[in-house]
Image: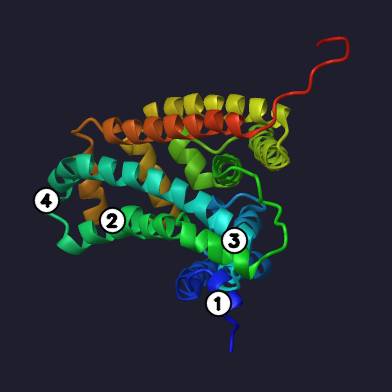
């Protein structure tokens, strides 16, 4: 039995919530692990049914990316269950990004819904709207409210009294680093995906351009490492990269057409008569509006987060000879 002094010092028990959200993280990890194993199996056995539309090394890259996401969710899941400080900080940063981007995504989907309904000829079931709200707003909102509470912070400090590498590192800096890591994954996705290249650029890119995307991914990983290390040059580089990425994304999406999406979709799995009818209906409307608004909004939010992260970094030391 605990002494009165220990009982008075111990914070309210938040372990049930830490375990619950940790289990959810482990579920996400399991889903990505399945993807990683499927990609790795197909790449190793050469059983890909459409080898003519897959770039060399594409499946291996996707396996590595899925495995990295698996490790991340697995780590924060176990860390949350055991009440680690760093797991709380990472979960707080992730849920903040998830809620911001999810809210914008749901809003843009709702704005585009009338066009989608007119193109397919029917309203989606109510469950579709409910799933959008849960995935984009309710679930990340629950994560955010739980991990940002003072009780959870105190509980993690009680369960994990040793100093953590995230101590003193503002959540916005962790969020900015996550944005860069996600950007690296997206760059790999463009550099090693023939369907995406056909959709965004009209055709498969030459090797030199695919290598450029690989370099962009490596650069963003380097900048993410520098942000976590609280280096000012990494922050300046991150602002520049995210700004350039936002402009490039805008230009790419403005050139996106229904024909390109149709060719990309047919190259992967083919199109049946119903698919073609939907694409024909989509050609009559201004396709880029909702998607363009979504891309611009995400870019502006990303840039604002990275700029704000600069306030959480130490000022550059004064140069010799200056007061």
Pointer 4 or 3: first along the chain: 3
Furthest toward the right, the residue is 320
Is label 4 in contact with label 1 (beta carbons under 8 Å)? Answer: no
Q: Which residue is mark 2?
A: 132
Furthest toward the front, the residue is 4
**140 shown above or below 182:** below
Residue drawn where x is 42% and y is 59% of the image: 143
* Image side of residue 127 versus residue 57, left or right: left
Q: CA gap, disc 2 to disc 1?
A: 43 Å
Pointer 1 or 3: first along the chain: 1
Residue drawn where x is 59% and y is 84% of the image: 2
Furthest toward the bottom, the residue is 1
* Image side of residue 129 versus residue 43, left or right: left
Give the tally of numbered discs: 4
Q: Secondary structure at mark 4?
A: loop
Q: Nearer the viewer, mark 4 or mark 1?
A: 1
Instruction: Residue 101: give x, y in percent of width and height.
Output: 40, 44
**Residue 76 visible somewhere in the drawing:** no
Q: Which residue is mark 3?
A: 87
Q: Nearer the viewer, mark 4 or mark 3?
A: 3
Instruction: Residue 192: give x, y in percent of width and height.
Output: 60, 46
**71 shown above or below 253:** below
Q: Nearer the viewer, mark 2 or mark 1?
A: 1
Q: CA gap, disc 4 to disc 2?
A: 20 Å
Pointer 2 or 1: first along the chain: 1
Q: Secondary structure at mark 2?
A: helix
Residue drawn where x is 88% and y is 10% of the image: 321
Q: Which residue is mark 4?
A: 121
Q: Nearer the viewer, mark 4 or mark 2?
A: 2
Residue 7's tag is 1
Is label 4 in contact with label 2 (beta carbons under 8 Å)? Answer: no
């Amino acid at each position: 039995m605990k002494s009165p002094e220990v009982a008075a010092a111990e914070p309210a028990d938040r372990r049930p919530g830490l375990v619950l959200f940790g289990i959810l993280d482990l579920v996400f990890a399991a889903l990505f692990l399945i993807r990683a194993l499927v990609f790795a199996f197909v790449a190793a056995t050469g059983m890909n049914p459409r080898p003519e539309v897959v770039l060399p090394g594409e499946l291996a890259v996707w396996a590595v990316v899925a495995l990295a996401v698996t490790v991340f969710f697995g780590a924060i899941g176990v860390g949350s269950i055991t009440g680690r400080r760093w797991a709380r900080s990472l979960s707080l940063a992730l849920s903040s990004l998830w809620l911001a981007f999810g809210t914008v995504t749901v809003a843009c989907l709702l704005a585009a819904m009338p066009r989608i309904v007119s193109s397919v000829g029917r309203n989606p079931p109510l469950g579709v709207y409910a799933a959008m709200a849960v995935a984009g707003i309710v679930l990340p909102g629950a994560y955010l409210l739980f991990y940002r509470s003072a009780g959870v912070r105190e509980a993690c400090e009680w369960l994990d009294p040793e100093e953590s590498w995230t101590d003193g590192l503002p959540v916005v800096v962790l969020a900015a680093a996550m944005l860069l890591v996600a950007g690296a994954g997206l760059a790999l996705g463009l550099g090693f995906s023939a369907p995406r290249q056909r959709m965004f650029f009209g055709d498969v890119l030459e090797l030199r351009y695919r290598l450029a995307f690989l370099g962009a991914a490596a650069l963003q990983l380097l900048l993410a490492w520098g942000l976590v290390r609280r280096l000012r040059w990494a922050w300046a580089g991150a602002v520049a990269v995210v700004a350039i990425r936002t402009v490039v994304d805008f230009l790419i999406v403005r050139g996106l057409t229904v024909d390109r999406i149709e060719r990309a979709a047919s190259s992967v799995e083919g199109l049946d008569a119903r698919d073609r009818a939907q694409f024909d209906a989509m050609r009559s409307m201004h396709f880029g509006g909702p998607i363009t608004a979504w891309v611009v909004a995400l870019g502006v939010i990303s840039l604002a987060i990275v700029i704000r992260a600069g306030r959480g970094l130490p000022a550059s030391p004064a140069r010799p000879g200056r007061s």
